[in-house]
């Protein structure tokens, strides 16, 4: 990657690895845009759903989604979830819809200027974008549990359940749309086990890696 030209850094991460904070701090150190909140806001605006609902939609199975949206919206049916379209008519929401909007937003963000993008399957969606580095951050389960408990105020049991649910949802989404596992090392230029490290130390390692180019 040439840091003197427009570049993109994608950070995929395990829940509880601190990847979102690392991405934000890395963008600050590099003086570029951090793309996480902007993308989520775009999805929320597009689908009129909460962040949690979008994540569940991405990772869930259609039968579960149908039951979920029955509880969520009076316009939902027992078969399919719906949103209100531009013409006021109901439109079915599917994981394909989420992926399509996510892909469009990611590519628009990457085309505008140098940026750091956390999550959102950026390593796959932006695979044809030049001058790009793809990073994966992982951590031991014990470290992830402690972080989730601290950050979200959950019990150990709740944290474990949340991590397993998110892990399964993200893996399901990546396998379906990218045809690969998010844990496949071939998807990334750099993989870091960040257990026991603070975010600034992780950023330092990434910057050292970038400096080798």
Image (tube, rainbow, N blue to C red):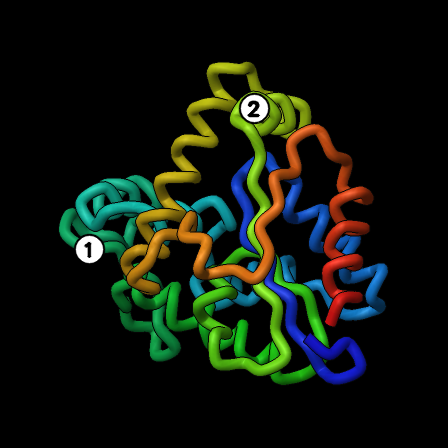
- Quarter that holds the C terminus: bottom right
Q: Is residue 16 left or right of residue 69?
A: right
User: Decide: marks 1, 2 in contact (CB < 8 A)?
Assistant: no
Residue 197 seen in the figure: yes
Q: Residue 21: percent from the left, percent from the top?
A: 71, 46
Q: Is residue 52 left or right of residue 206?
A: left
Q: Residue at x 30, y 46 (%)?
A: 60
User: Which numbered dot is residue 27?
Assistant: none
* Of pointers 1 and 2, the one earlier in the residue sequence: 1
- Viewer-closest of 130 and 63: 130
Alpha-carbon neighbours of circle 2 within 10 Å: few (<14), some, or many (≥20)? many
Alpha-carbon neighbours of circle 1 within 10 Å: few (<14), some, or many (≥20)? some
Q: Is residue 209 left or right of residue 191?
A: right
Q: Residue at x 52, y 41 (%)?
A: 14
**Which residue is disc 1 drawn over?**
80
Q: Secondary structure at mark 1?
A: loop
**Which residue is disc 2 drawn over?**
145
Name above or below for residue 164 compared with residue 53. Answer: above
Q: Secondary structure at mark 2?
A: helix
Q: Is residue 110 left or right of residue 102?
A: right
- Viewer-closest of 191 and 121: 191
Residue 41 seen in the figure: no
In this rendering, which labeled residue sits more in front, label 1 or label 2? 2
- Viewer-closest of 83 and 29: 29
Q: Residue 189: percent from the left, percent from the top?
A: 57, 62
């Amino acid at each position: 990657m040439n840091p003197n030209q427009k570049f993109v850094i994608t950070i995929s991460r395990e829940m509880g690895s601190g990847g979102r904070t690392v991405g934000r701090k890395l963008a600050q150190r590099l003086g570029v845009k951090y793309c996480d909140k902007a993308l989520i806001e775009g999805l929320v605006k597009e689908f009129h759903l909460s962040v949690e609902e979008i994540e569940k939609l991405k990772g869930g199975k259609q039968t579960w989604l149908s039951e979920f949206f029955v509880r969520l919206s009076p316009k939902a049916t027992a078969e399919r979830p719906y949103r209100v379209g531009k013409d006021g008519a109901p439109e079915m929401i599917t994981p394909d819809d989420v992926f399509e909007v996510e892909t469009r937003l990611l590519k628009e963000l990457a085309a505008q200027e140098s940026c750091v993008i956390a999550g959102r399957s950026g390593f796959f969606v932006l695979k044809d974008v030049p001058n790009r580095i793809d990073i994966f951050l992982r951590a031991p389960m014990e470290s992830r549990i402690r972080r989730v408990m601290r950050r979200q105020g959950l019990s150990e049991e709740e944290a474990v359940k949340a991590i397993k649910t998110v892990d399964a949802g993200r893996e399901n989404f990546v396998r379906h749309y990218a045809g690969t596992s998010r844990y496949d090392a071939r998807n990334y230029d750099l993989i870091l086990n960040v257990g026991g490290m603070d975010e600034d130390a992780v950023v330092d390692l990434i910057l050292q890696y970038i400096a080798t180019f």
